[in-house]
Image (cartoon, rainbow, N blue to C red):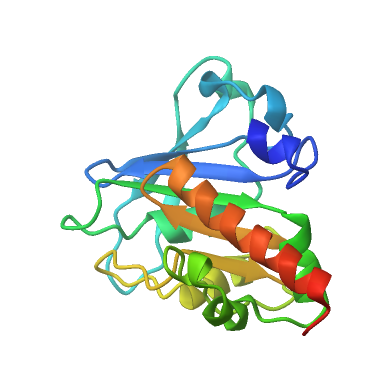
Amino acid sequence: MLDAYKRNWITSRDGNVSIRHHDRDHFYITPSGIRKQTLQPDQFKKIKIKPTDSNQVGEWEEMAYTDISSKLTPSGEIPLHFGLQQNMGQHHNDVRVVVHVHPTYCIAAMHAGIDLSTISDSFPELNRYTKVAPNVGDVAPTSQQLADECFNNLALKADGHIGYDIVGIKGHGVVAIDTSPWRAYEHIERLEHICKIVLASKNF
């Protein structure tokens, strides 16, 4: 988050991250309203994934973690993170990290009418390592609709399989998923670099 701030991918209190181990019934998420360039581990919120019937929408609740985090609230994007963290599958990777930031050129490209999934074919250094999903439209931040559309466009299955590594949200930002914060970060870095090239070329 500090590096994202230095790159102008977020302003001081923007962006959010979550992490879960596949064999845990909880995940950790950044708190709301905290300056991300000074974020500390004990400020993360611990969120329990409550078991439900398969036909029901999952539920979550806050758990005690530290005295510091108990005074904070989870990120407003918790519907998004919960939707992407609740189905991992026991055979899948043992860690899932979800990173949501607002990189300038990715957002600018979507504002210019570019579907980020369509530009990857022209840039092998992007599509070799990063699978880009079709854009999510202009939907309200922190909403269940945003969570649902990101879930669907990333092609996340009940068994934990994920079809794509990153998805753009028009007028908002991107969401990347991988097995570590830095792997997710690299998907954002690659896509941001390509978007900058495309916008500079004016060939879109």
In the picture shown, does residue 84 fall above or below 115? above
In the rendered image, which quarter is residue 53 located in?
bottom left
Q: Residue furthest left?
A: 91
Q: Is residue 91 left or right of residue 170?
A: left
User: Whole-percent x and y of residue 167?
Assistant: 56, 68
Determine if residue 171 is in view: no
Residue lying at 36% horizontally and 43% vertically, measured from the top left: 20
Residue lying at 72% horizontally and 54% vertically, measured from the top left: 102
In the rendered image, which quarter is residue 34 located in?
top right
**Closer to the camera in the image, 58 or 106:** 106
User: Whole-percent x and y of residue 156?
Assistant: 38, 70
Q: Is residue 16 left or right of residue 55?
A: right
Residue lying at 61% horizontally and 63% vertically, measured from the top left: 191
In the picture shown, does residue 41 fall above or below 165? above
Determine if residue 177 is in view: yes
Assign the C terminus to one quadrant of the image: bottom right
In the rendered image, which quarter is residue 90 located in?
bottom left
User: Whole-percent x and y of residue 60?
Assistant: 44, 49
**Closer to the camera in the image, 98 or 104:** 104
User: Whole-percent x and y of residue 95?
Assistant: 31, 45
Looking at the image, how many numbered discs can be counted on the residues? Answer: 0
Assign the N terminus to one quadrant of the image: top right
Q: Is residue 169 left or right of residue 55?
A: right
